[in-house]
Image (cartoon, grey):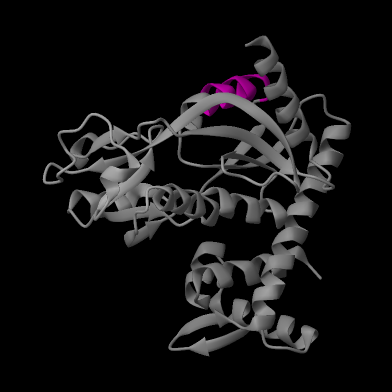
Amino acid sequence: METRILNYFLTIAKLGTVSAAARELHVAQPTLSRQIQRLEADLKTPLFTRERHRMVLTKAGLAYQLHVQQILIELDRANQLVRNINNDELTGTLGIGSVESTITKFLTPQLINFHQENPNVIFDLFDADGTSIKERLDQGLLEVGFVSTPINTAKYHYLKLPITDSWGIAVNQDSPLWQQEKISISDLKDQPLIIPHRQLVRDELFDWLQAEEISSQIVAEYNLLTNAIYLAQAGLGTLVCISGVELPVNSRLKFIPLEPKRELKHFLIWRKGSPLSEVAQTFINFLKAQLSIQ
């Protein structure tokens, strides 16, 4: 089967309509429809249902999408490997997942320095919480991830990074906590909370609250901060977040650290038992060397 057809399938799955996929791929819409129909006939199962002018993946289609993504990633890595065998210059794409934290300030100069040494490497960046990053590592959609504690590293090789963040809250001027420079867990009593939805983080937060015999009032959960900041700014609740995420100046939110300090550590992780591309292995070795110098 041609990889072109698989790319057609993935593009329709991503965009949801044949017409949108045809525009992105610069392929005639009837041609695209015929190719997908032929693919479904070859597989002897429908990959999409047609609902109100949209193409929605069936259960089989969802499973096929995941495996096709992995196949094309592995094929791309194989192509990169072959190209690099007779080429002294490192070439390829590096899929990097990263949480929102102080890690951004640490990672930026590392990527710049690595790119200066390897100008033919392209970075494919994915911002998410630690759970989503690990899921994409497990699926082969990323090769390395920058994550923070709490984390279970049983399935991953890891490299501890020399950076930490600390937990706190962000509140607007109407909050009764606005005047405080530090807050304790007991100060969160009766406060509506906007919290990260990552399970390990939630469990840790609830342990802190229960230790102070405080019942939690959760009004919202988030994985990335953008929408959560708007909610906190509007006064929906107290935003639980970390010091390493810079709040926009125009958000008019104030970050207040927890006392006693509760820190997060950061790690670079990559999956055990999964072969790395030359680009990923070179990047890991590069980062190890940089850390040893520091």
- In magenta, the rendered stretch is 107-118
Residue 148 painted magenta: no
Residue 216 image point, x, y percent: 34, 58
Res. 35 visible in picture? no
Looking at the picture, how far across and down is residue 157, in whole percent?
Answer: 76, 38
Q: Looking at the picture, does residue 246 appear above or below residue 28?
A: above
Up-down: is 252 above or below 56?
Answer: above
Q: x, y (%) of residue 10?
A: 63, 67
From the image, which quarter does the C terminus lie in? top right
At 58% from the left and 53% from the top, the residue drawn is 131
- In which quadrant will I find the N terminus? bottom right
Q: Is residue 207 visible?
A: yes
Residue 252 is drawn in which quadrant? top left
- Residue 113 forms part of the magenta stretch: yes
Identified at 60% across, 19% down, the residue is: 113
Instruction: Judge left or right: residue 83 versus residue 149.
Output: right
Quadrant hosting residue 227: bottom left
Q: Is residue 63 left or right of residue 248?
A: right
Dominant SS of magenta comes to: helix
Residues 227 and 34: in front is 227
The picture places residue 24, in percent across and down from the top left corner, at 51, 63
Instruction: Name which residue lies at 34% across and 54% down.
Output: 214
* Furthest residue toward top: 293
Say which of 22 and 155 sits in front: 155
| Residue displayed at 66% across by 65% down | 7
